[in-house]
Image (spheres, rainbow, N blue to C red):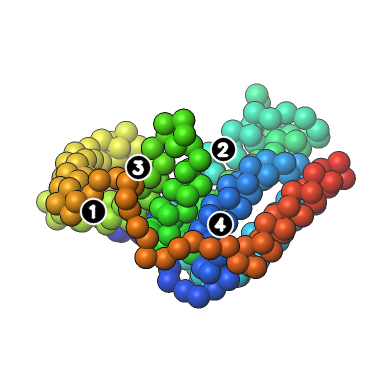
Amino acid sequence: MSPLSAPVLGQYVPGDSILHRLDPRTKIVVIFVYMLIVFLANNGITYGLLIVTTSVGVFLSGVPILMILRGLKPVFILIAFTACLHLFFTKGGEVLFSMGPITIEEKGVMQAGWISLRFMLLVVTGMLLTLTTSSIDLTDGMERLLTPLRRVGVPAHELALMMSISLRFIPTLWEETNKIMKAQQARGADFESGSIFKRLKSFIPVLIPLFVSAFRRAEELALAMEARGYRGGQGRTRLRKLTFTGNDSIAFILLFLLVIGLIGLRSQ
């Protein structure tokens, strides 16, 4: 079995594009709202508007398009499975294919296409956040956004740090999985042949050392943070202050126009 390609989600690509220069709070809010308004799309016009918006975002990020496409590979099976469910179980419209009890109807085809497109848009926008924002900026941005919740006892700094570390260690765990698989293959493990149940069973020798390695890394990280005097967000200073610029204002204006456009085009 060929080594697993490194996941794009969680990676950061250094650059000086417009998206890289945006305040991390702006990117978090804009992408969060975008992921919500994706569900407002219900026809070809609204989905076309979202495709254009996402394409412009990818272009402005300066991230290679091949890297974006590679990031869709890990979720392709989920997208295909969801599409098949809608294809065979969503009924309505003209019957396009029939074989015994199995029928594929027009509404099922349309729903499968829209849902698959929606998944891809969500994944791409999520990748744009991590690809153009370093883990430190991402932590600072989330902490600042969660700061008002401290009044009700929400540990804003700890939550932001936890989410940032989780994203940061996705590529690390993936690399560790590759190393373990290569070691198992060198010992005669076979991950390709046999039935689906046999192949799933063959991954057990990979999962056990992977969990052991993950817990070991977590313990090492905790000890390193403790040795450096980490005490949460209390008294913490920052080298770079987060400030909004004109580009951030433009991003919020464009987001507002996109929301209004989607709401207005839903009935077309």
Which disc is residue 176 wearing?
Answer: 1
Which disc is residue 82 wearing?
Answer: 2
x then y, percent, for residue 37: 68, 44
Q: Which residue is mark 3?
A: 158
Please give the name of the residue rendered at 42% of the width and 31% of the height, measured from the top-left corner.
Answer: 153
Q: Left or right of 157: which side holds 35?
A: right
Of callouts 1 and 2, which one flags the residue occurring earlier in the amino acid sequence?
2
Q: Left or right of 254: which side holds 131?
A: left
Which one is nearer the viewer's eye here, 100 or 156?
Answer: 156
Q: Left or right of 60: which side holds 234?
A: left
The amino acid pointed to by label 1 is: Glu
Please give the name of the residue rendered at 73% of the width and 28% of the height, measured from the top-left corner.
Answer: 91
Q: Which residue is mark 4?
A: 27
Work out whether 243 lies above or below 192: below
Front label number (4 vs 3): 3
Q: Residues within 10 Å of mark 2 (few under 14, many from 20)?
A: some
**Secondary element at image label 3:** helix
The amino acid pointed to by label 2 is: Thr
Front label number (1 vs 4): 4
